[in-house]
Image: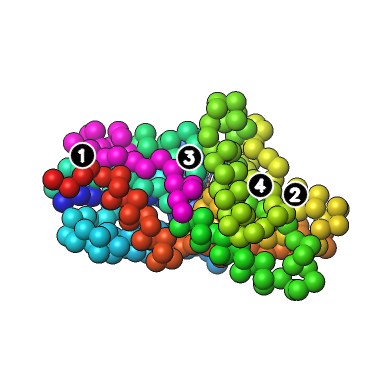
Amino acid sequence: MMGLLVMSYGTPDDPDEIAAYYTHVRLGRAPSPEALADLRRRYMAIGGVSPLSERTRAQAQGIGRALDRLQPGRWKTFVGSKHAWPFIEDGVSAMAAAGIRHGVGLVLAPHYSALSIGTYVDRVRDAAAQADVTLSVIESWHLLPTLVELLAERLTVALHSLPLDLQGNAEVLVTAHSLPARVADMGDPYPAQLAETAGAITRAAGVKRWRVAWQSAGRTPEPWLGPDVREVVRYLAAQGTKAVVVCPAGFTSDHLEVLYDIDIEALAVAEAAGLVLVRTDSLNDDPRLMDALAELVVSSGPPRS
Ligand code: FEC
């Protein structure tokens, strides 16, 4: 029996957990009361809790079902989050407790950075070593053909949702979570991988006007990768662009960074600048993506003996 550990960022499932979650995200440093209040306000604006946990579970189940069709009875699926229970380490322990010795780890975010996927990989490796489990982690899947196809389809749908007279004057903004700008000096593949995804999906959708933008940068003094999506929206409006389609390609599911940072915050900036903003639907547990990820998992695991 093989194990699959499906990993995502994690979210507080109850408003009472926001402080502990935020402290975990900040590597054990408690946030200031102002920063905590601001994060609470953002969760309240999307209904109190993020749908991330529910989406991750649905994605794990979808990939699990697809694995069962590809290799009946060979795989058991577990979930683990970076910043909330069940943590990555809990997922690995559950795998070991089920008597599983070999498996694959998959993060539900397509682009690799040492500061993002790299930290999931480190934690999986440490936990696996302690639990005597061998896990190979898929580091990126930003050009997976089905990912490109599905994002291109969603891009086309979003473009066509604009009023006819705006469709010819719209620009596509392909976004991912910003990271400290020092990743660029570290030779980190993250910015190039996002550009590659953006190029592939816009090519597949036949979109000519597009650019990459960053979103959700941390509230710290150090510089973060830019330009920020809100800055780009203001710039484009000043240049006479009438509509933008935001495609948050760096994420797979609905959660705070999409539902607040794009649907509320970036939308308000667009409205103030007199520009229409629409967003591509999230991939969530789209069965075509779940099937493709299951195939990727099978090809990343050890061959069947
Ligand atoms: O829906 C939810 O409740 C959780 C949504 C969520 C996702 C997510 C994904 C990524 N993050 C990445 C990097 C950073 C870095 C910092 C950072 C901070 C936060 C905070 C919240 C948050 N992140 Fe996140 N991230 C999500 C949520 N993230 C909340 C804290 C408040 C704030 O700044 O807004 C800065 C840490 C620090 O302050 O030291 C860096 C990256 C991803 C995409 C890859 C992945 O999904 O793992 C990269 C979803």
Q: Is residue 58 magenta?
A: no
The residue that mark 3 highlights is: 112
The answer to whether mark 3 is within 8 Å of ligand 1 is: no
The residue that mark 4 highlights is: 212
How far apart, in angstroms, are the residues tagged by discs 4 and 1?
39 Å
The three-letter amino acid code for the residue at tag 1 is: Val
Question: Which is more N-terminal, label 1 or label 3?
Answer: 3
Question: Which is more N-terminal, label 2 or label 4?
Answer: 4
Task: Choose mark 4 or mark 2, whichever is in front.
Answer: 4
The three-letter amino acid code for the residue at tag 4 is: Val
Identify the residue at horizontal 28%, vertical 37% (top origin): 127
Instruction: Please determine whether, in this image, residue 125 is positioned above or below residue 158.
Output: above
Marks 1 and 2 in Cβ contact (< 8 Å): no
How far apart, in angstroms, are the residues tagged by discs 3 and 2?
24 Å
The residue that mark 1 highlights is: 133
Query: Pointer 4: residues within 10 angstroms few (<14), some, or many (20+)?
Result: many
Q: Is residue 7 visible?
A: yes
Q: Magenta segment range?
A: 124-145
Question: Which is more N-terminal, label 3 or label 4?
Answer: 3
How far apart, in angstroms, are the residues tagged by discs 4 and 2?
9 Å
Query: Pointer 3: residues within 10 angstroms few (<14), some, or many (20+)?
Result: many
Q: Give how far across and how far down residue 8 sits, in percent.
A: 42, 50
Q: Secondary structure at mark 3?
A: loop
Q: Secondary structure at mark 4?
A: strand
Q: Give how far across and how far down residue 138 sits, in percent.
A: 37, 43
Instruction: Please determine whether, in this image, residue 282 is positioned above or below residue 219.
Output: below
